[in-house]
Amino acid sequence: MNSQPNVVPGQCWLGSPIDARPLFAAEQAALMATVRGLEPADWRKEAVPGWTVRDLVAHLLGDFYGRLGRDRDGHRDGPAFAPGETLEEFIHRINQEWVDAHRRVSAAALTDTVDRVGEQVARFFETTDPDKASLGVSWAGVDPAPMWLDSAREFTEFWTHRQQIRHAAGQETDPNPRFLSVVLDTFMRALPHTLRNSPAPSGTQIQVHVGGPAGGTWTVTVIEGRWSLTAPATGRPAARLSLDAETAWRLCTRGISSAAAFAKTRVDGDRQLAEAACQVVSIVY
């Protein structure tokens, strides 16, 4: 019997826990440095298809309020699923409704509010119990998810949106490995779910190697009929993919297509398994 009903058991296939909690304050500071450094014209530039920089900053504010209301304050009112609506459709709809409602809010007012509320979000995550059951992470195939994965997923969203703002303003990706290493490690937790429809004999392994100071190597293994991140690398993997960090995070967020990423990836071994792994998506898409 599980004596801790709020703890998520039996999800070791996700790999070792990630502790993103100490990074939220630094990420918030980096976000504010980026936003406060924008020129007036930057706010009108497209950050993601259909959204300007101003829209994306408003979306971040919505994420902040949603997290605080739901998990810190126990607030349960809010939008509900429409009949027949999928999770992806629901999220895209409520995100768009929030952005549309905030188009009357000035860039200056958004900046000040994101600053104040974002600091509260960082403090909230610093106090979370990493083993507690939390929101599901659909792209990892787990619901409920342990808070460590939910927190890490939220960190990757904040980081990714900051890069999209930077890119819109003509800046390159922030290469700080302190942030990017956690982002990549979190994104790779999607691999077992990505490969769920790629059966292989027990013990089959696929390795994904990302180069550079923020990179690493992740090994997924078939254990008892499912892909898992728990087993250590043993011998020669059936397929090995090697790619750079920029390609890796853009692939996982669909900033680059899987075909384009695969063309930039060195593949050794089974190309069919490698192509399956290169379908990885670590966002709601």
Image (cartoon, helix red, strand yellow):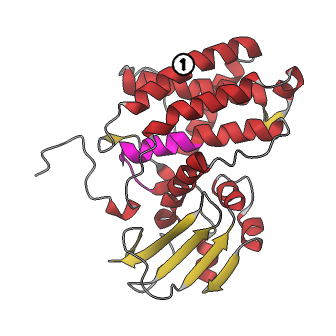
Horizontal relation, residue 257 to residue 242: left or right: right
| Residue 48 to residue 192: above or below | above
Q: Which residue is mark 1?
A: 117
Horizontal relation, residue 149 to residue 285: left or right: left
| Residue 238 to residue 95: above or below | below
Horizontal relation, residue 71 to residue 158: left or right: left
* Residue 85, visible in the rendered structure: no
Number of dots carrying numbers: 1
Residue at image point 29% right, 41% down:
132
Q: Tell whether position 254 is magenta.
A: no
Front position in the image: 37 or 80: 37
Q: Tell whether position 150 is magenta.
A: yes
| Residue 48 to residue 70: above or below | below
Q: Name the spot of residue 235 as percent of width and height, x first.
A: 45, 88
* Residue 53, visible in the rendered structure: yes
Judge the density around disc 1: few (<14), some (14-19), many (≥20) Cα neighbours within 10 Å.
some
Q: Which residues are magenta?
A: 141-156
The overriding secondary structure of the stretch rendered in magenta is helix
Q: Name the spot of residue 44 as percent of width and height, x first.
A: 85, 26
| Residue 26 to residue 198: above or below | above
Residue at image point 59% right, 37% down:
158
Residue at image point 74% right, 46% down:
173
Figure quadrant of residue 91: top right
Q: Secondary structure at mark 1?
A: helix
Q: Name the spot of residue 238 as percent of width and height, x first.
A: 53, 86
Q: Name the spot of residue 20 as percent of width and height, x first.
A: 46, 43
Residue at image point 31% right, 38% down:
129
- Mark 1 residue type: Val
